[in-house]
Amino acid sequence: MFKPYIMLDKITDIDVESLKNLNITTIMTDLDNTLLPWNSNEYDLSLRKWLNQMAQNDIEVMIVSNNSYERVEKAVRDLPVSIVARAVKPLPFVIMNHIREENIDPEQVLFVGDQVMTDVLAGNMAQLKTVLVKPLVNTDAKKTRVNRFFERPILKAMQMRDKNLYWKDSLNDRK
């Protein structure tokens, strides 16, 4: 349940061509340390360029966050994304309900996040393809530090069993 479909350095490593090859029309992504540093609303211009490229190619990007709608909206107010707040990850129910309500085919969804124990687990339990990315900054909120403590040995154990589970450069690198 903790194993991601693929591991990439950052969300902007996901390119349109690879998404089209996988028939992906929707990216559901975590906010903190995946799109933006957890302790800032500042984003890199490469993120805006990437989001614009997704929008131009009819790939919807949804932020799925455990934060309040107000917190997420404040952070991404000028970005072309939609918001699913109070997602209660790692539980998959809010994600699954949103997919059903929006009439989205789960086969066409890629779920991206920086935490194994919340993002990957939630995406896998919702039966979505999951992408684990490296956190944008090396620090974490207090509540996240506990997850990181447990996820490191889980990830190492998975990598020992699966030699193909390592950081890749693009979705095309998945074997």
Image (tube, helix red, strand yellow):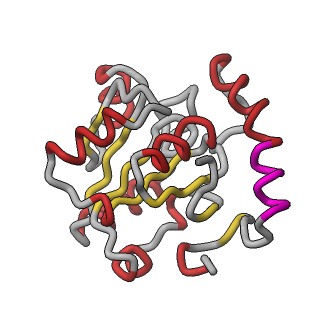
Image coords of residue 79 (percent x, y)? 30, 45
Image coords of residue 17 (percent x, y)? 40, 81
Q: Is residue 169 magenta?
A: no
Rendered position, 18 above or below 69: below
Rendered position, 159 above or below 21: above
Q: Using residue 151 as the reference point, say whether residue 28 is left or right of it.
A: left
The residue positioned 65% from the left and 25% from the top of the image is 144
Q: Is residue 157 magenta?
A: yes
Q: Which residues are magenta?
A: 154-161
The residue positioned 55% from the left and 46% from the top of the image is 120
Image coords of residue 159 (percent x, y)? 79, 60
Q: Using residue 10 as the reference point, say whether residue 90 is left or right of it.
A: left
Instruction: Give whichever of 119, 18 is nearer the camera.
Output: 119
Image coords of residue 121 (percent x, y)? 54, 42
Residue 135 found in image quarter: top right
Q: Quadrant of the image for the C terminus?
A: bottom right
